[in-house]
Image: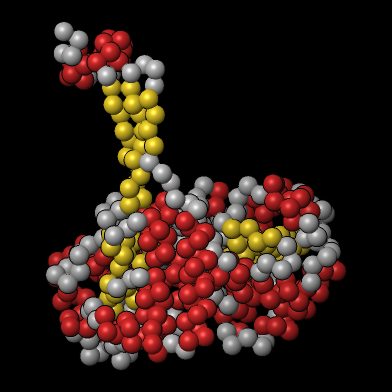
Amino acid sequence: MPCPRFTVTGPADFGALRALLATREEAAGDAEEKVRRILADVAERGDAALVELTRDFDCKTFDASCLRVPAADIEAGKNAVPAADLAIIEEAAANIRDFHERQKEQSWWVPSPGGTMLGQIVTPVDAAGCYVPGGRGGETPLISSLLMNAIPAAVAGVPRIVAVSPPRADGTLNPYILAAAAVCGVTEIYRLGSAWAVAALAYGTDAITPVDVVVGPGNIYVTTAKRLLIGRIGIDMIAGPSEIAILADSTANPEWLAADMLSQAEHDPMAAAVCISDDKALLDATCAELAKQVAALPRNDIAAASLSHYGALVAVPDIDVGMELINTIAPEHFELCVADPWVLVGKVRHAGAVFMGHHCPEPVGDYFAGPNHVLPTMGTARFSSALSVSTFTKKTSLIAAAPGYVAANGPKIARLARLENLEAHARSVECRLK
């Protein structure tokens, strides 16, 4: 199985790997025009458009009565999940909640000697929508996506949290999605997928009250809909294909490195899996393990395509150059598979999440530990962050000024206004100086 190999001696050689990863940018092609038509259709025809589109793509017998999932179905879904599985979901949810509780920001205000009270009021949005992909025919439900999106919204104090997910061919949702919703306390769920689900959340229909923020992963149509609706709604991010980058030294286990690379390669033919090391023998052994392990995967066709097009084994002269390369590509998931990761973590400038040491593979964070797995991709970790409680909050500035403050500073404020040729601004201050 081919996997591109690179030899890097310093920053001058970084361009080839960056160019390879950049080619993963999904071309919208005709998706944008299709999505624009869908958005306009839902805005104009509401529930009728939702029913028609869902019949065409998901469930041929769908009608308006199928849109909202009844409370009894949510409870039945939870009860249909084996107790052992439900306990795992509940434990993961508790870990995620505990982590995000630590992100909560408080409102604050402070007096100043000059006669003002300044502060910031932190409030949640009124409503959030969580898009949950149904997976292949609804049989690979993205439980973790619902947990990672709904729990931070709940911690933020959002009073109304809505979930949408495409129905299976028989019009139902996978019971694991319903069980995860019940664990999160989400009771408003709609059987909707693709761009029309995002449109319904943004515009609202007779059956669905609009929301303020839409979060969650999806295909090019979901992503394009979110991008086109920015401004009407807030979103988490514009996410590209998944990616992992590993920096490994001679103490790493090639079997484990290959398994970690494949954990992302199986997502999508456009996913990227990169292993960087100063030990050429380790890279050779990892390459052999990739060939061995990919053949045994159920999704081996997807993983093989990902590795052959966007996988990379990169030889560097030393770990410091490897770290420079990591910061250049700003990976979504970054594994520090070295003897002492704590020595190097201070050098990490750009990464969505960092996984420390040989015993912390990416799925630990993806599913269970607590940090959010909705992370910036395609190098956007240079300027953006993981989905968090702040995704669902707003910050409002607070300014209170006493008469003495206006008396002392009014002429200066009026002068600044007149420098901008805004006379009414100046007069609104000066009228208080009489």
| Figure check: 10 above or below 311 | above
| Figure check: 335 above or below 299 | above
Q: Residue at x 29, y 73 (%)?
A: 187
For this rendering, which residue is in front, 302 or 344?
Answer: 344
- Give the quadrant of residue 190: bottom left
For this rendering, which residue is in front, 419 or 107?
Answer: 107
Q: Residue at x 44, y 81 (%)?
A: 141
Please count the marks in the image.
0
* Residue 40 in sight here: no
Q: Residue at x 76, y 50 (%)?
A: 343
* Residue 164 in sight here: yes
Image coords of residue 231 (percent x, y): 29, 51
| Figure check: 283 above or below 352 | below
For this rendering, which residue is in front, 128 or 133?
Answer: 128
- Give the quadrant of residue 314: bottom right
Image coords of residue 271 (percent x, y): 56, 69
Q: Quadrant of the C terminus?
A: top left
Image coords of residue 315 (percent x, y): 78, 61
Q: Residue at x 48, y 57 (%)?
A: 100
Which residue sits furthest top?
Answer: 434
Q: How is the image coloured?
A: secondary structure
Q: Quadrant of the N terminus?
A: bottom right
Q: Does residue 344 appear left or right of residue 29 in this picture?
A: right
| Figure check: 28 above or below 132 | above
For this rendering, which residue is in front, 367 or 96?
Answer: 96
